[in-house]
Image (tube, rainbow, N blue to C red):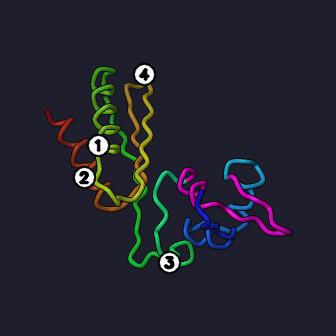
Amino acid sequence: MSDRFYTVEQVASWLELHVRTVRNYVRDGRLPAVRIGKQYRIAHEDLETFTGRPVPASDGATAGRPGHSEASTIVEIEDIDRAMVDRLSTMLMAAAVDRGPGSRSLRIETVYDKERARMKVIVLGGLADTARLLECIEGVLAS
């Protein structure tokens, strides 16, 4: 087991969340932590499991991420059938998983409204990864 532990403040800074949010995650049991006196300590492994990405080796929990930018994108696709939805969803999930080491997290959600033949794709991630996914969507729809 690692001897690296982080304070709630360090985790909040690294995740760019409010300290209260991180404390709520701990209290709800979503983020495992050890209580030492009146403070919580979060183990390195638990933080990596919670985020699904590696924690920087240097004391990255307190360091800001210079130049960090993310995109929140919603794509609405109309007049789409179930077969194309399945094809597009599979391609997006594969693209999200098949990224190089050290890539930032990428979150993709898809929703299909069968009655309206409408699909929504929600992408949360880095600018470059999001741009590549949007190009993939355009390519699949053009084919």
Callouts 2 and 1 close, C-beta under 8 Å: yes
The spot of residue 107 in percent (x, y) is 43, 48
Residue on which the image places disc 1: 95
Q: Which mark is drawn over residue 11? A: none
Say left or right for 50 vs 108.
right
Q: In the rendered view, would you say 142 is above or below 134? A: above
- 67 versus 125 height, above or below: below
Q: Is residue 48 left or right of residue 139?
A: right
Q: Which residue is mark 3?
A: 64
Q: Where is mark 4, residue-wise? A: 114
Q: Secondary structure at mark 3?
A: loop
Residue 40 magenta: yes
Q: What's under tag 1, amino acid-wise? A: Ala
Q: Measuring 40% from the left and 56% from the top, which residue is drawn there?
A: 125
Earlier residue among tags 2 and 1: 1
Residue at the disc numbered 2: 132
Q: CA distance from mark 4 to mark 1?
A: 24 Å
Q: CA distance from mark 3 to mark 2?
A: 26 Å
Q: Which residues are magenta?
A: 32-50
The residue tagged with tag 1: helix, strand or loop? helix
Q: Of marks 3 and 2, which one's residue comes earlier in the chain?
A: 3
Which is more N-terminal, label 1 or label 4?
A: 1
- Which residue reaches farthest left? 143
Q: Quadrant of residue 36?
A: bottom right
Say whether disc 3 or disc 1 marks the residue closer to the N-terminus.
3
* Residue at position x 58%, y 57% in the image: 47
For the residues labelled 3 and 1, say whether their Cβ atoms are less than 8 Å apart.
Answer: no
